[in-house]
Amino acid sequence: VIIMAPASLILLGATVILQVDLLPDKKFLLLPPVNFTIKAINLAQVLLRWEPNTDQEQRNVQLGYHVKINAPQEEDYETRNTESRRITILHKGFSASVQTVPWSDRSLQPSSWVSAELRAPPGSPGTSIVNLTCTTNTKANNYTHLRPYQVSLHCTWLVGKDAPEDTQYFLYYRYGSWTEECQEYSKDTLQRNIACWFPRTFINSKGRDLLAVYVNGSSEEAVIKPFDELFALHAIDRVNPPAKVTAEIEGTCLSIQWEKPVSAFPVHCFDYEVKIYNTRKGYFQTEKMTTNTFISVIDGISEYSIQVRAAVSSVCRAVGPPSEWSEPIYVGNDEQKPWTTWFLIAVMATICFILLIFSLICRRCHLWTKVFPPVPAPKSNIKEFFVTINYEKTGSNETETEVISYAEEAGSETLEDSVF
Ligand SMILES: *[C@@H]1O[C@H](CO)[C@@H](O)[C@H](O)[C@H]1NC(C)=O
Ligand SMILES: *[C@@H]1O[C@H](CO)[C@@H](O)[C@H](O)[C@H]1NC(C)=O
Ligand SMILES: *[C@@H]1O[C@H](CO)[C@@H](O)[C@H](O)[C@H]1NC(C)=O
Ligand SMILES: *[C@@H]1O[C@H](CO)[C@@H](O)[C@H](O)[C@H]1NC(C)=O
């Protein structure tokens, strides 16, 4: 017992010290926020809001909130505000949780979670639109100099497979704080809207906001389920092809020039691709570049078809699809070869004709003997040799046949020589 006493005292002392250390933390419990609500404030936009717990003991500790989005897509972030705006699709519903966390003193335990939910909008399954696709395009603005460019929006979709025949769909878009309803629909055979065209929108083609598109509907027979989708502008923008493409050939030098597409993006924001098609050799050559000029050395005896396309470079915005190819322009001359070929054929045909006439005349009046007197010495050319021999038997029918056949053969030889 005497030996144990000091040890117990030491233990007791340690416990007391531990308790002094732990006490403030154990007592200072963080309480979860109250009145957590989620509200749809706009198309594809929600406002999350909560209040600090009034029962929370006030200490000299800074508090913040940890927000966890559970649906439609998991996301996680911290904030010191008591509200938070999110851009998100809402047709599948939305749910989130929030807890109180110490902002700087990480040794404190976070509070428990509070959750809230925005239910998916009602509607019969299979009635909402499917395969929504949208594209934007920029045009020079004719009407006002305040906005030099106007952005159009075109969307198409398919009718839900279980949507009643009397279903009608309505499309809305939101960009930033601007929301507009479609005024120009295209319809299917049952007069149901299946596409929409906005010639002018509030979309800023250089902006980084997501474009929200929402399509709801009505029917006498069913509740039509709404649908919404978010689009990144760089992914749906149909960039215009380069403007004023020109090309010329000087000697063996092909030079191609063009201007930046009609676009709110400045000149330095474009990458280009040039496609040169050699119509004689039948092959394509494509070149990528960042300048507005392309110069190439060519063989000069072909026709070339030239097209250029553009894409907004990653310097200015996230990479999206390139523009369409510009209308092909043609330079060079491919007529030369067929023309010479036709000329040769004409010349040869004339020669043949002349020879034929000539031989016919010979047959009549034995002109042959006068024009080509006999050559006494034998020649290496066998045909000529035969002719010479045949000639000696002048007067017989045989000789005449031989002479004609020679003349024809000579003609065909000439032809063959000319062809090859
Ligand atoms: C929470 O909401 C209730 C009822 O809406 C209200 O009475 C209360 O004051 C709110 N609490 C806080 C901390 O704002
Ligand atoms: C619609 O989209 C689905 C998948 O998203 C695809 O399988 C289907 O082929 C598309 N239908 C049409 C007509 O494009
Ligand atoms: C301007 O408007 C006229 C007629 O309204 C049209 O022909 C022309 O193509 C427009 N120009 C541009 C650059 O949009
Ligand atoms: C579709 O949505 C718009 C905008 O939220 C709303 O004003 C309209 O009443 C809705 N139409 C139907 C048929 O639900």
Image (cartoon, grey):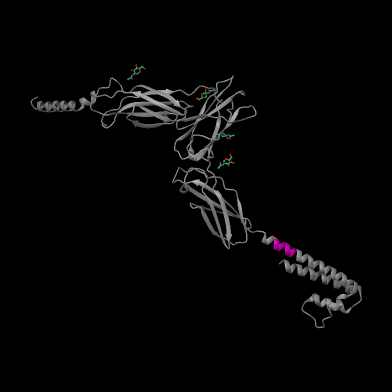
Q: On the image, which quarter does residue 409 sit in?
A: bottom right
Answer with left or right where residue 307 lies relative to residue 314.
right
Against 136, residue 418 (above or below) is below
Answer with left or right where residue 254 lies relative to residue 40.
right
Residue 274 rendering spot, x and y as whole percentages: 54, 52
Q: Quadrant of the N terminus?
A: top left
In the rendered image, the residue lying farthest to the left is: 2
Q: Quadrant of the C terminus?
A: bottom right
In the rendered image, the residue lying farthest to the bottom is: 377
User: Who is closer to the viewer here, 100 or 9?
Assistant: 100
Tell me which residue sits at (45%, 27%) in the image: 42
Against 259, residue 4 (above or below) is above
Residue 345 rendering spot, x and y as whole percentages: 75, 63
Identify the magenta region: 339-345
Q: On the image, which quarter does residue 375 sit in?
A: bottom right
Q: On the image, which quarter does residue 95 sit in?
A: top left
Q: Main secondary structure of the magenta part?
A: helix
Tell me which residue sits at (87%, 69%) in the image: 360
Residue 96 rendering spot, x and y as whole percentages: 40, 26
User: Who is closer to the viewer here, 207 or 10?
Assistant: 207
Residue 160: in magenta span: no
Tell me which residue sits at (77%, 77%) in the image: 381
User: Who is closer to the viewer here, 306 or 25?
Assistant: 306
Residue 128 rendering spot, x and y as whole percentages: 55, 26
| Image mark count | 0
Tell me which residue sits at (73%, 68%) in the image: 418
